[in-house]
Amino acid sequence: MRFEYCYSKTGMFACREEEVGRLLMSAAWAAALVSVRERDDRSKAVALGDVGGGDLFELSNAVEKGEQEFDRLLTIWADEGNWTREELRAGLTIVKRIVAAESDASDKEAGSADVELELYRVVSGYVFSFVVGHELLHYAADRCMLSDSSELERTGEFERLLKLHGQNGLLCSLEPLLTTEVLADRCAYRTAATFDSALQRKKTSLPHWKIMLGRRLAVDILSWALAYGPGSPGRSSYTDDMRFLRAGTPGYMHNPLRVVGFARSIRGRDATTDGKEREIICEDSARVAVIQLNRILAFCAGADSRSEVVASVRNGQPMLVNELGVDLPGGVSEAWRTGVFVEESTFSCR
Ligand SMILES: [Zn+2]
């Protein structure tokens, strides 16, 4: 209900144009980078393992600020060695084409050859199924327009997340949960699951691995947006300004739990074409979740000294590993057990 990306109440629904624009641009960059990487090496594109929500926001923000800022970013990325200036320039060309196609009202359906536009619609569709599904509940006076319960509810997963949110001594509420926000998230999960099933039924020229990657990138974008809120900065702020990373908003479920619910709603684990399972809470969304969960654990334990914080986090983690381990990369469970986080492997999208 807070006016962040969107705001709604009975009969009224409004969004901040610039914030919605930033989410859409991030989705466009996701599609563009997949395409650029695929030209280079398909196996690298399958996981797009070096790209997370923070990168997508960084690129979107730089383009918005103008040519000089974008050029500055190209140099940084090129120096890091994962992407060349030419690749990122090619990405920008694709992003501009997606924006032009989406702005052209006469182009109702993308041509089947336009796989970038299709992938963009998949990623943005997942993100907005959550955002809009949540707000529509408030708009319709706390009634979800999708009346059938989702698989997440039928399997008891939704209840388990709620329980985990408020468990004494482990994760505690900053403030009591607001019923309307819980119902709104439940509705958001139903909407996301419905979007996912519709996508499965639809004829698409996208191969299965691209749809899976689209889910993973949508989770990353949503996770980053929830963690930083409006004006979400890019990846550079992840290291520089961690204190602005929010574990949650009072009255709402903690961010990592909201993201887990979203990921599970859109089939968090799914077989790839090579038969292996792949997590979709990985890269930035996994990093953000780990930091947030540890912060909540320490807060809930009322720890105020550094050693107390470390102890409380250690005590709470085994339970979290049991509850959330399946949704986070195997490296996270391992790092929680051993206390050793290795940047390249702990959060890796395998
Ligand atoms: Zn709300």
Image (spheres, rainbow, N blue to C red):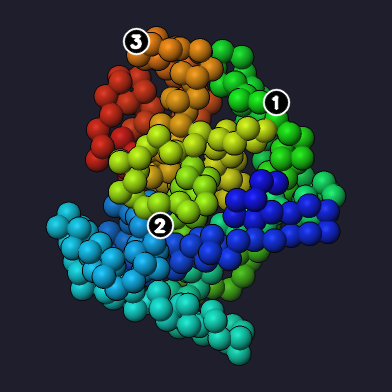
Secondary element at image label 1: loop
In the image, residue 132 lies at what x, y percent?
67, 57
Quadrant of the frame with the C terminus:
top left
Residue at screen point 54% across, 60% down: 19
Residue 57, label in figure: 2
Identify which residue, 84 or 295, lies in the foreground.
295
Classify 256 as above or below 263.
above
Identify which residue, 265 or 287, lies in the foreground.
287
Residue at screen point 45% across, 12% down: 303
User: Mark 2 Cα within 10 Å, few/some/many (few <14, many 20+)?
Assistant: many
Say which amino acid is labelled 2.
Phe
Residue bearing mark 1: 176
Identify which residue, 261 or 152, lies in the foreground.
261
Residue 223 visible, this orientation: no
In the image, residue 245 lies at what x, y percent?
44, 38
Residue 307, label in figure: 3
